[in-house]
Amino acid sequence: MRLPAVLLLLLAFVCIATGGCMREKQDTELSRYVTEILPRLRSIERGALAEYEKVSGERYEDDAALFDALRMVVVPALTGLISTAEIARPEMDALRHLHASYVAVLEKELSAFQLYVVSLDQQDADGQQRAIDQLRDAKELMGAFERRLKEFCAERGVTMPPSAQES
């Protein structure tokens, strides 16, 4: 009779200890994600978007400069970024799902820029407007990703540095 009680206590201790270790491992993974992985990815993303901003909006000069920047810099940078981001697959389920939503936003940005390139090449004003609208949607989705990640970090007591956030 005494042996089952001891085994039950031992089993309970192992479960509690393992759960604590798993939580610590997950928090370490989350911390690494927001302090190392995401800032590197966001840096590349910001660089690509900065190249777009140099030739669009108030800085727009002509379609040729915009076309060249998109085709030669922005689209290749985002294509490479997506490939890199897909390699970084977190182990923790919740973080993996969050990361997948980040990759999905990057894919939406890339798709919008690709549409923009084709539309500029074909002088399709409607296509250009659709691309701009898709970029606006992608920006909103990026904001939603960032809010969800901040909430997740807050729940776990992990600080999210500015370099991992949208600028």
Image (tube, rainbow, N blue to C red):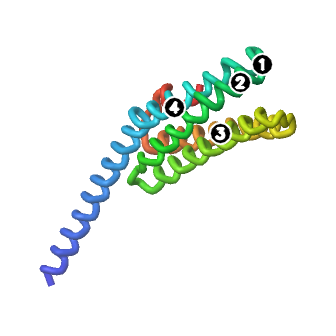
Q: In the image, residue 161 lies at what x, y percent?
A: 46, 28
Q: In the image, residue 120 lies at what x, y percent?
A: 77, 32
Q: Amino acid at mark 2?
A: Leu
Q: Amino acid at mark 1?
A: Asp
The span from disc 1 to disc 3 (Cα, nearest Å) is: 22 Å
Mark 1 near mark 2, Cβ–Cβ under 8 Å?
yes
Q: In the image, residue 111 lies at what x, y percent?
A: 67, 43
Q: Which callout, 4 or 3, points to the residue nearer the camera?
A: 3
Residue lying at 13% horizontally and 80% vertically, measured from the top left = 2
Residue 62's disc number:
1
Q: Quadrant of residue 58?
A: top right
Q: Alpha-carbon neighbours of circle 3 within 10 Å: few (<14), some, or many (≥20)?
A: many
Residue 164's disc number:
none
Judged left or right of residue 112, residue 164 is: left
* Residue designated by label 2: 66
Residue lying at 82% horizontally and 40% vertically, measured from the top left = 127
Q: Amino acid at mark 4?
A: Arg
Q: Nearer the viewer, residue 45 or 79?
A: 79
Q: Residue furthest right?
A: 126
Q: Which callout, 2 or 4, points to the residue nearer the camera?
A: 2
Residue 109's disc number:
3
Judged left or right of residue 31, residue 16 is: left
**Mark positioned earlier in the residue sequence (1 or 4):** 4
Residue lying at 42% horizontally and 47% vertically, measured from the top left = 87
The span from disc 4 to disc 3 (Cα, nearest Å) is: 13 Å
* Residue designated by label 4: 42
Q: Secondary structure at mark 3?
A: helix
Task: Quadrant for the N terminus, please.
Answer: bottom left
